Image: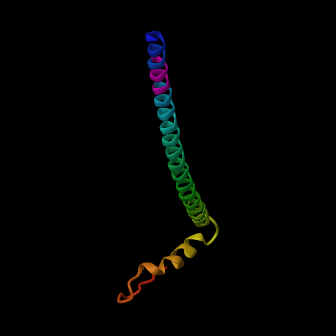
Amino acid sequence: MQEQHRDFIYSLIALGMKIGLLAISVVSIFKLGIASHQRMERHSEISSVLSVEASRLKSLQEDFDELFTIGGGNRFIDKQDHWIAPNRIRIMWR
């Protein structure tokens, strides 16, 4: 009788350990899922910012390359008229 009681207690301890390991596994998988989701959100945000900055870089490179074509300096000066404040007198140096 005592041996059956001892076996029952050991099996309860083993069941408790298995339930504890299962709980730890479930919580770990849940945390990994949350971390993966956050990482994917950050990746999509960074990739969208990268695409915006890449298009901006391409337009700036095209503007820079346009400076070295024939008449590029004059086109550059014509584009810079927005830098002059409205209450200032414009002076053109040509």
Residue that extends furthest to the front in the rendered view of this protein:
1
How far across and down, in percent of the image, does residue 48 sit? 57, 58
Q: Quadrant of residue 44?
A: bottom right
Residue that extends furthest to the left in the rendered view of this protein:
87
Q: Which residue occupies the foreground of this view, 93 or 66?
A: 66
For the image shown, how many numbered marks are present on the structure?
Answer: 0
> In terms of secondary structure, what is the magenta stretch mainly?
helix
How far across and down, in percent of the image, does residue 59 sit? 59, 65
Is residue 14 highlighted in magenta? yes
Point out the stretch of residues depicted in magenta. Answer: 10-16
Is residue 13 highlighted in magenta? yes
Residue 14 vs 90, above or below: the answer is: above
Residue 34 vs 64, above or below: the answer is: above
Residue that extends furthest to the top in the rendered view of this protein:
3
How far across and down, in percent of the image, does residue 8 sit? 48, 19
How far across and down, in percent of the image, does residue 78 sit? 53, 79
Q: Which residue occupies the foreground of this view, 81 or 15?
A: 15
Residue at image point 48% right, 35% down: 23
Residue at image point 61% right, 66% down: 66
Q: Colour mode?
A: rainbow
Q: Is residue 70 left or right of residue 21?
A: right
Residue at image point 51% right, 76% down: 77
